[in-house]
Amino acid sequence: MFNRFCQYAALCGGALLLCCSLSARADEVQDANKLFKQGQYDQAMAKVDSFLAGKPKDAQARFLKGLILTEQGKTGDAIHIFTSLTEDYPELPEPYNNLAVLYAGQGQYDKARVALEMAIRTHPSYATAHENLGDIYAKMASQAYDRALQLDRSNTSTKTKLALIKELFSSDHSRAGTHNVATGTVNVAKPQPAAETPAAPVVTPVAVAAAPVVEPVPAKPVAAPAPAPAKPVAAEPAPAKVAAAKPAATNSADVLKSVHDWAAAWSAKNVKKYLSFYAPDFDTPGNESRSAWEAVRHDRLSKPKYIHVKISDASVKFTDDTHATVTFRQEYRASHLSSSASKTLLMVKSGGKWLILKEHAKD
């Protein structure tokens, strides 16, 4: 139910960096990470298993295997992986956090609570675990109040408390239980003091998207050209150039509207509308075919029980009248995953509509 850690290397929030030298083995795990981000779980698992055959105790590879198993719906196997990591590396908070995610998904809130308390004990500044623990307490309180009402329907105080908790979760359905999962690399180095240890990414509500970036228009009108000059006066911009600045503001708003409509279709799990925002010549990742990419996206939109995408700090830069680059912060939450990333979309205007030509995410 939660998801937040680091990130499979990118999906969608920051990462805890593994302190190790660049080597062939690191590249192999990184390749598996990339396949995982692309939704190619079987291929990613094959690489991880091959790596673990020679390095069976490697924490980073085992952690990635736990993430893959989680995505594949093999909860029991994922729990086994994360449990073994807590036994071999009890100083790491992330495996405890992800165990809590899986337990909460099964309704085992007491086990989830214990796992989160262990995560906090090993890393007191781990904000993700604190947030998840708050969600667990709220869920357990909700169950207790519900049982109390079953015994005494006339208890108005309990009704009020239960209503407040339900309102808390209904205001953002992605918060219904622990949901922040650690994803990505694991720092297996000796833990540093809390003030120096990089915390896992924290997904928090974001503000409304910033106003679109607009090219400034001169505050004063351009003076009329002198009568019949021998040559154009260089200091006086031609009227045509002044007029051209106005459509830029409109175009920025149009581009951002398209981006927000794309995010809304994603949140609504409307696969057909979501895919309609991608240009026919969209640059698919990994050189896969358009049909294969669409099949993966269809599965990733249809599989979660819910999806919620928020966009903030958006800005637009135009290459020309029909090409623009949009950068923003994307917060993604789903029933099994939560992440945050900086994203860049290359947009093209086609048929009067701004479409996505290429997309790139960075933790």
Image: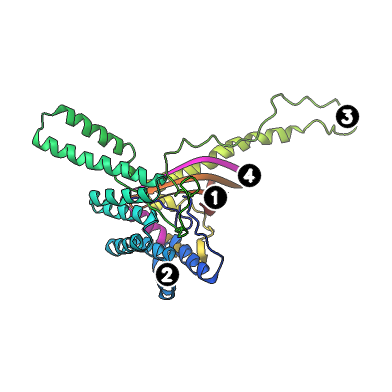
Query: Where in the figure is residue 74, as x and y percent of width and height?
Result: 30, 63
Residue type at mark 2 is Val
Q: Which range is magenta?
A: 295-321
Q: Is residue 270 above or below residue 237?
A: below
Which label number is shown at residue 318?
Answer: 4
Mark 1 element type: strand
Measured in 3D between alpha carbons, the distance from the residue under mark 1 to the one under mark 2, in whole angstroms, is 31 Å
**Depth check: 243 or 69 in front?**
69
**Depth check: 87 or 23 in front?**
87
Which residue sits at x=37%, y=54%? 301
Q: To which residue does mark 1 refer?
A: 345
Query: Where in the figure is residue 250, as x and y percent of width and height?
Result: 58, 36
Q: Is residue 343 left or right of residue 118?
A: right
Q: Are marks 1 and 2 in contact (CB under 8 Å)?
A: no
Label whose residue precedes the other's in the sequence (1 or 2):
2
Residue 264 appears in which quarter of the rendering? top left
Which label number is shown at residue 237?
Answer: none
**Depth check: 351 or 105 in front?**
105
Measured in 3D between alpha carbons, the distance from the residue under mark 1 to the one under mark 3, in whole angstroms, is 46 Å
Which label number is shown at residue 229?
Answer: 3
In this view, the mark in front (4 or 1): 1
In this view, the mark in front (1 or 2): 2
Label whose residue precedes the other's in the sequence (1 or 3):
3
Label whose residue precedes the other's in the sequence (4 or 1):
4
Which label number is shown at residue 48?
Answer: 2
Measured in 3D between alpha carbons, the distance from the residue under mark 2 to the one under mark 3, in whole angstroms, is 75 Å
